[in-house]
Amino acid sequence: MFSWLGTDDRRKKDPEVFQTVSDGLKKLYKTKLLPLEEYYKFHEFHSPALEDADFDNKPMILLVGQYSTGKTTFIRYLLEQDFPGMRIGPEPTTDSFIAVMQGDVEGVIPGNALVVDPKKPFRKLNAFGNAFLNRFVCAQLPNPVLESISVIDTPGILSGEKQRISRAQEENGFSGLGRCLYGGYDFAAVLEWFAERVDRIILLFDAHKLDISDEFSEVIKALKNHEDKMRVVLNKADQIETQQLMRVYGALMWSLGKIVNTPEVIRVYIGSFWSHPLLIPDNRKLFEAEEQDLFRDIQSLPRNAALRKLNDLIKRARLAKVHAYIISSLKKEMPSVFGKDNKKKELIGTLGEIYGRIEREHQISPGDFPNLKKMQDLLQSQDFNKFQPLKNKLLETVDEMLAHDIAHLMILVRQEETQKPVQMVKGGAFEGTQNGPFGHGYGEGAGEGIDDADWVVARDKPMYDEIFYTLSPINGKVTGANAKKEMVKSKLPNTVLGKIWKLADIDKDGLLDDEEFALANHLIKVKLEGHELPNDLPCHLIPPSKRKMIE
């Protein structure tokens, strides 16, 4: 009896079954989230609807910075190749958005043609009109780096009052960036559109002339809610001395702390990202280490792309729910006949109070609400009579998606990661430092002596032998207890000394002979000099008398 009720209830609780993460994201968005967005005009307030290409595209990196911070040169450095439309100079050279993507043949696709290509994730940029599309191109070229990622180069943001006035006069726009038009299009809104869809946002600063203009500050603020994607590059750091570099780094962190309102510190990479000799090579090792950290971060993007898209869909769903509550609340407050215009003004003025009421009634975090000032501005041009009342079924569908289907997709993400080969960015600058003598740390620390014919530990072995024979060796070996008395003098933690013992005790007999003892002391020196210990003992560190044993 009433068996159909039970069937419907089970259907609600059972999550959707998907073959791939990408297919799952598409289906969930189209069947469960998109109806809510369309019903409450989400796309008119926040972001255009997503398309299949948004879920299928390669990871994208968005480069943002003031002019002459080295954005275009940074792309050239990664690719180790010029790309169509590339212009580099000390003056503002890049005046367009350039999507640098993989292609079989070198060429440039203009913006108007680009936004009608269903295979590219740019169709919704059509909403920004010809003023923007005339300054948007896709540079295609065959390059191994671009087989895994795409890069978006942006116009250099001008700094200083003089440049702001210059651009405004040149383009008949407005200085400032509140919601200004650059050459007839909303620059900040375009950046926000890209920020929602890219996997990494890299903010570039010039260490030689650190000046965060009002325009750049507004751009960074426009990227709010995407702080998890942000990384900072302090470029051209080879142009200043070490002491000055420390001051510049401190000033940058202080400035960012005022603009980016998050408790976490944004990761800053210091270096000189071009293929020219370092002007001041004092910090070469620092630059190499920072470059490797940045490269590892970029190389991880293909592996984490599915997880990023899943995370962005969750953020979008939370915003869409809040938006539905806001629109339905405004609809509920509107009179049915008289005084509609006055009531609309009143509701817009008291929107902050409506936010507070929704927050309390539905237990929503304040961080999930859209920017109050931006929402008030957008509401000015809206007809409140066309707003829809609260439709619980649509909200319940999205809640069900977040509670059940997303969890299922998370499991699928992990399964795909384990089943597929490790995806990493290859080619270009990523190849030059992976292997060979110019790899980061090659010939240093535990890698010292890797190319030498003689055992590197033998250089200091006479000194270690003197200590060894004071520890009362029996049958040519010292006990663990006696070795410990000497090793703890290094003041290294027991966890580190324990790892050194395991590496040095090659025959695993719980004792150290003179070669193993010398090796242990060599590894202690490596650690004290600030290098990391290897997980496995490299072949060149194995004592000559033990090499046959290892084989």
Image (cartoon, grey):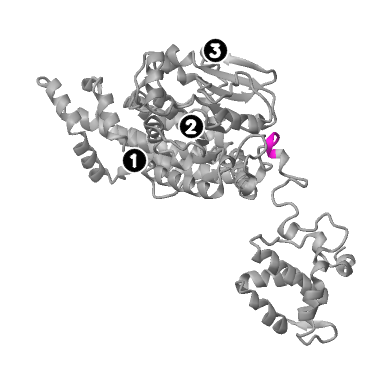
| Element under disc 3 | helix
Instruction: Decide: is 469 above or below 361.
Output: below
Determine which residue is flagged by label 1: 368
User: Residue at point 34% right, 25% down?
Assistant: 176
Give the left or right position of residue 15, taking residue 298 as reference.
left
Against 472, residue 548 (above or below) is: above
**Residue 516 shows in the view:** yes
Q: Are marks 2 and 3 in contact (CB under 8 Å)?
A: no
Residue 98 percent coordinates (x, y): 55, 22
Marks 3,1: beta carbons within 8 A: no
Instruction: Identify residue for label 2.
Output: 65
Above or below residue 10? Residue 341 is: above
Q: Which residue is mark 3?
A: 113
Say which quarter of the image contains residue 364. top left
Earlier residue among tags 2 and 3: 2
259 or 5: nearer the viewer:
259
Identity of the residue drawn at 10% across and 21% down: 339
